[in-house]
Amino acid sequence: MQYEIEVGGRRRHVVVHREGDRFDVSIDGRPFQVNAVRIDAQVLSLIVGAASFEVTVAPDAAPAPLIVRVGTTPVVVEFQGLNGRRRFGQRGDPADVGTGPQRIAAPMPGKIVRVLVKTGEAVVARQPLVVVEAMKMENELRARRDGTIAEVHAKEGQSVEAGALLVVIQ
């Protein structure tokens, strides 16, 4: 896949080829080998050369933007791909981004193993909410920012489809 990406006002040409968990990435002609492992529905662990990064990509309540953080640093990214232009990330404190409700959905089909919150409970960013078992692995779904649990749709033992609404946080 090829992209035109703007990071911090600077446009870059990015080419990505995937082979399993490894990606061959070229940024403005400079090659990188990247290993990626999904930690949970929003967090990836990336190894680029000898460096390791935790990258969080969490959709906000609105259709766009997405909050993209490398470690604790928010990054504003715009890219031009096959589906047109989209904006990712926000400037400023990631905890302040987005004021609408957070809708936590199942990332893939699976079974609810644990529900860790109740309606009315206060939660903080990155707090575990629900554990979903999929493909014999447990995926811990977390709050993207502080809030209060408004709705809990998940029940332990319940089977869910990808995209099923599990928790809403105000």
Image (cartoon, rainbow, N blue to C red):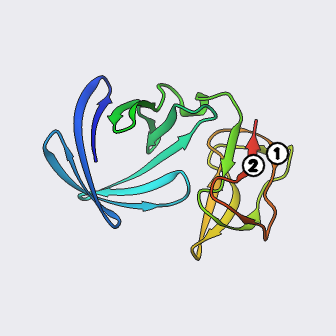
From the top left corner, tell me how far across and down residue 48 is, in percent. 27, 55
To which residue does mark 1 refer?
A: 151
From the top left corner, tell me how far across and down residue 159 is, in percent. 73, 67
Q: Quadrant of residue 157?
A: bottom right
Q: Are marks 2 and 1 in contact (CB under 8 Å)?
A: yes
Most foreground residue, 106 or 125: 106
Give me the residue at 35% from left, 65% from top: 21
Q: Secondary structure at mark 1?
A: strand
From the top left corner, tell me how far across and down residue 127 is, in percent. 67, 51
User: Is 35 on the left-hand or right-hand side of 99?
Assistant: left
Mark 2: which amino acid? Val
To which residue does mark 2 refer?
A: 167
Give me the residue at 59% from left, 56% from top: 107
Measure the alpha-carbon separation of dots 2 and 1. Answer: 6 Å
Q: Secondary structure at mark 2?
A: strand
Mark 1: which amino acid? Glu
